[in-house]
Image (tube, grey):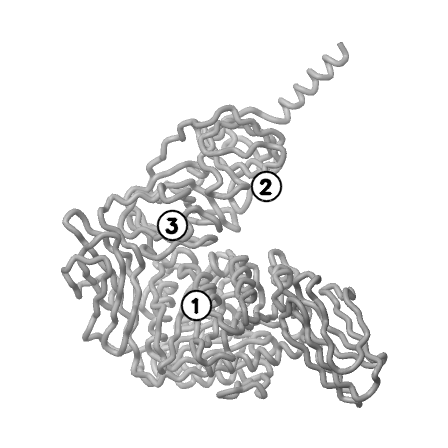
Amino acid sequence: MKSYLLALLALCNALLLSAQTDIQDLRDNYAVGQVVTITGIVTHGEEMGSSVRYMQDESAGIAIYSGAWEGFTTPSRGDEITVTGEITEFNGLLEVGPNLSAVTINSTGNELPDFEYIDLSDFNEGVEGELVNFDGAQFQDGGSTFAGNNTYTFIHEGEQSIIYLRTGSALEGQIIPAGQITLRGIVSQFTFDGFGGYQLLPRDMEDLISNSTINLASQLTQSSHDESSITLNWLTDTPGTTVLYYGTDADNLTETASDMAAVTSHEVTMTGLEPGTVYFVYAESANDDSAVQSSVSSFVTVSESSGDIHVYFTGSVDTSVATLDEAISLGAATNDTIAAYIDRALSTIDLAVYNNNDQTIMNAVDDAYDRGVQIRYITQGSNANIGLGQINSEIPVLERQDENGSGMHNKFVIIDADDTDNCALITGSTNFTTNGLVEDYNNVVFFQDQSICRGYRVEFEEMWGGSGSQPIVGNSKFSSLKLNNTPKQYTIGGVPVEAYFSPTDGVTDAIKSAIQTTDSDLDFALLVLTRDDLTEAIIEEDNLFLVVARGMIEQVSGNGSDFQTLLDGGVDTESHEGIFPQLHHKYCIIDHSSPDSDPLVITGSHNWSSSAETVNDENTVIIHDASIANQFYQEWYQRWSELTVGVEEVENQWDVRFYPNPASDVVNLYVNNTGSSKLSVSLLDITGKEVYQSSLQGKKHLLDVSSMSHGVYTLMIHDGQYSYAQKLVIR
């Protein structure tokens, strides 16, 4: 009897602790932290990852987060399951889990719930976790390719929202449909403040249904351009006509260029264009049954400007490694240099600057306004921006108000965009603050080119809300509300330059593509690296024959840092954390030592993080030029030399050489020490632990490292009084 009563009591307690309910009742009447039991149909499987499943009953839908389903059978699409667990919330998304106490599969192969037909006005908490359907949706980037861990904008009945694809999605590598489609998926949410942030999760290509008999099989791409023409190309899956609609006003594309022959590979040239001018374009291909239109893209003609590109650094540089032009360190004169460019402005200055407390720059802005220059200023509203309180109060300033990520994190200035000879774009990594301009290690890039000034102006005016002197707050777009509507390819003084803006332009993909062009060397200097896809790309290049990757990261101990992952992958990586001044750069140099191998530099405001990719307003430039790559290398080499331990200057001057580095089997070591003949060599792992030690006799030695784990080591040579140390990478 006693045991019976105890069992009954346990059952009652379980019922009290875990309430059986339907999903809508859970959403309406239960709070985070309570334990519930729910039953429903699983609406997807492994195609959306292993740790989460969405389920629906007749009332609503919800996410079930398990972590690894440890102790439970992993549910599949069409399973009816009963789940008991704690209600939690993750960045706005209501979930059950990860504290699951029971998962029971009641049956399999069940019919899925019907899709709910909605428009974007209904895309909210009321349908979170449910299967929904958008009829007549269109992707902004139709014709390009899906990549994982990215968002993509779609438009439905004049409004826009996003889908999200995780790494490993079934959609990865697939062509993004162009034209109107039926778009289906599961409603999810990701927002830092708990409001908004709704996104659609399509499961596979069956959730993207085209009703057209002709579809784009590639994005609209530029094959060439000059001062008066642009040639564009695209592919279709079946033969069709070739027509372009274009103009300088995105809302009035009336000019056409066409070829009515039925082909699958399309090429058409727009002629009679103006120099240094942005043109908005969409393509159309048709067959006897239907037609497909691309989304609107933009391209730019080559300008008649000088095309000068100047690079400056706030910290010291090592010109001993200069091969073409010596890099320039401005030091404390960085603000004066920016102010000097502002002083030259004749008609307009547009500033998109994250933070500003510099009096010199603000005085220059004030002076420009006083002499009749139109000033427009965009900043992040949550920052101090002390300098803005010191300029003329009549200068219009627009603040991005939300605090998602870093917000409006750009650092660019556009001067006289409509003046061929006086225009200038200032960009780079530096904030207009004492830290950014004087103390931190940063870079500043100046372009004298009308095409890129006007391309950046498109981005500025989208945030501004219009082309006028005053912002139109109701039209202003930040973050994912923006369109992918700026030119990507420029030719500036004969130099190919790419420009991208976050979070709409697929910046991480562009950076990854640049990394994958490496033939010999890849050197990076980053404030932060938390993007696994970029980390994996660096490791993959470093593992290629004759490619060596090296770099520095400032924030190595923060949440999500990939510093250790790089080390584990054999990439020679140094921590700059805790060292003054701060390494604030966001640059990568590709093939600086190989002038015939497309040397390039990636720089801008975009940190290599998910916030920069998906939330922040950022800008990135990729400059394909051997001289500029080498100038960045001069700065990089100076920072690298400060971090790595070299030869101590001793009276008996050692000559030490070892190769190869990286090594996999043996290291050839040459040591000429004119002092003591009692030498030893050691290898230290990244923790400082000695993992190899041997005495040295003579000058030439072979070190067998074939049995050692891959990674970064310190090679130490000792004579009892002095020591020599250098980094050795073992693969």
Q: Residues within 10 Å of mark 3 (few under 14, many from 20)?
A: some
Tell me the distance, in whole angstroms, between the alpha carbons under discs 3 and 2. Answer: 28 Å
Q: What amino acid does circle 2 point to?
A: Gly
Instruction: Give the labeled residue for mark 1.
Output: 378
- The mark that comes first in sequence, 3 or 2, is 2
Q: Earlier in the sequence, mark 1 or mark 3?
A: 3
Q: Distance between the residues labelled 1 and 2?
A: 41 Å
Whether residue 362 appears in this view of the structure is: no
Circle nearer the N terminus (1, 2): 2
Number of the label disc, if any, that sits on residue 67 = 2
- The amino acid on which the numbered mark 1 sits, given as a three-letter code, is Ile
User: Callout 1 environment at 10 Å: few (<14), some (14 to 19), or many (20+)?
Assistant: many
**Front residue of this view, candidates 143 and 609:** 143
What secondary structure is marked by label 3? strand
Quadrant location, the C terminus? bottom right
- The quarter holding residue 183 reads top left
Q: Where residue 394 sits: x, y (%)? A: 41, 72
Residue 161 is tagged as 3
Whether the residues at callouts 1 and 2 have beta carbons within 8 Å, the answer is no
Which amino acid type is shown beneath numbered disc 3? Ser
Between marks 1 and 2 in the image, the one whose residue lies nearer the viewer: 2
Q: In this view, does 302 lie to the left or right of 17?
A: left
Task: Report the quarter where the N terminus lies.
Answer: top right
Estimate the x, y position of residue 567 in percent, counting from the top left.
64, 63
- Looking at the image, residue 35 lies above or below residue 337: above
Residue 13 location (% of width, % of height): 67, 22
